[in-house]
């Protein structure tokens, strides 16, 4: 089966400077964290070799991480890809990411598919498409966007979209609760834009349409921050049936900043 693989790798290295505020270090070379990027693909074939589907992985990660928050970013990327592509075998154990790790994700996915080819429950050629991006424009934070779309038999494909905001000061994945003045008021503000995105009236009940506990809207922790505002994502099946799809809405910056305890600054 390996001789049927179509493999392409494109590597791009982007460096981001991080300067020190200490006058005593002005004569030192600035540290240069490296964000490595690549593209990998594998072609999977049907049992009779008449059909084929390309699985693709566009990725980014920190090479030789110098800071704890870079390790947090890498560990999150590794776990996301492993958990969305591997359905059997050992659990994920983090180690430094390399380009080989990402190729291994698709190799292992193909191995699982090969087993499925001989299974009576075979429904079609499997597929796994994923993308990882790292955004460093929000000062003091690094943001990661991780998307995966996969088909492993059954009635329909599935997807997983995950957004993370990692603090470069605490090395932790940030919760929106840690930067808002009043949690309940923030829920109410977010609900306003959730309803707008879903075309719901302000007084329309959520009980029959969505799966919020007791019909009361609550934000999750799947969010990102941009100059436009704070964007939340609910994945399929998270608060509504699959047919509703992925739910995404944004709290505009002009309203968001009134509710925050911190100033958000973005590099140009």
Image (spheres, rainbow, N blue to C red):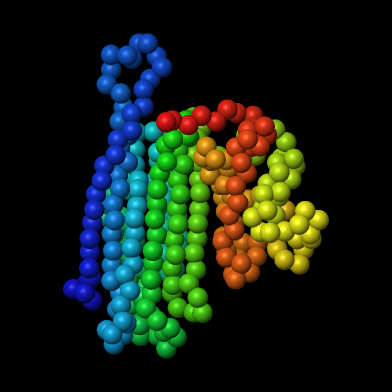
Q: Residue at point 50% right, 53% down?
A: 162
In this rendering, would 164 be left or right of 192? Answer: left
- Residue 145, how many percent across, how many down? 46, 49
Q: Residue at point 61% right, 41% down?
A: 252
In this rendering, would 56 be left or right of 247? Answer: left
- Residue 234, how many percent across, how many down? 59, 57
Q: Nearer the viewer, residue 256 or 164?
A: 256
Q: Nearer the viewer, residue 147 or 229?
A: 229
In this rendering, would 30 be left or right of 227? Answer: left
Determine which quarter of the picture holds residue 16: top left
* Quadrant in the picture for the N terminus: bottom left
- Residue 80, how many percent across, how many down? 45, 55
Is residue 167 shown above or below 146?
A: above
- Residue 28, how many percent across, how many down? 28, 17
Q: Residue at point 41% right, 64% down?
A: 85
From where the camera sits, is residue 172 visible?
A: no
Residue at the extreme right of the image, as rendered: 203
From where the camera sits, is residue 20 visible?
A: yes
In this rendering, would 212 be left or right of 75? Answer: right
Determine which quarter of the picture holds residue 13: top left
* Quadrant in the picture for the C terminus: top left
Determine which quarter of the picture holds residue 246: bottom right
């Amino acid at each position: 089966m390996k001789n049927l693989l179509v493999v392409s790798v494109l590597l791009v290295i982007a460096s981001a400077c991080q300067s020190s505020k200490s006058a005593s270090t002005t004569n030192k070379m600035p540290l240069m964290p490296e964000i490595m990027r690549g593209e990998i693909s594998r072609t999977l074939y049907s049992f009779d070799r008449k059909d084929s589907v390309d699985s693709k992985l566009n990725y980014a990660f920190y090479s030789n991480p110098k800071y704890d928050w870079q390790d947090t970013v890498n560990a999150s990327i590794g776990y996301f890809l492993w958990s969305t592509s591997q359905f059997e075998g050992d659990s994920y154990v983090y180690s430094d990411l390399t380009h080989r790790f990402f190729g291994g994700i698709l190799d292992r996915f193909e191995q699982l598919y090969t087993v499925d080819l001989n299974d009576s429950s075979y429904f079609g050629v499997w597929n796994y498409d994923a993308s990882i991006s790292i955004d460093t424009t929000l000062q003091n934070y690094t943001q990661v966007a991780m998307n995966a779309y996969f088909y492993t038999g059954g009635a329909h494909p599935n997807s997983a979209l995950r957004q993370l905001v990692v603090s470069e000061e605490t090395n932790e994945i940030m919760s929106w609760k840690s930067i808002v003045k009043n949690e309940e008021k923030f829920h109410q503000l977010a609900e306003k834009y959730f309803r707008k995105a879903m075309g719901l009236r302000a007084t329309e009940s959520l009980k029959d349409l969505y799966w919020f506990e007791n019909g009361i809207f609550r934000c999750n922790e799947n969010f990102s921050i941009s100059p436009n505002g704070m964007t939340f994502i609910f994945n399929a099946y998270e608060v509504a049936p699959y047919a509703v799809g992925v739910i995404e809405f944004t709290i505009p910056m002009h309203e968001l900043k009134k509710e925050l305890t911190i100033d958000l600054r973005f590099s140009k």
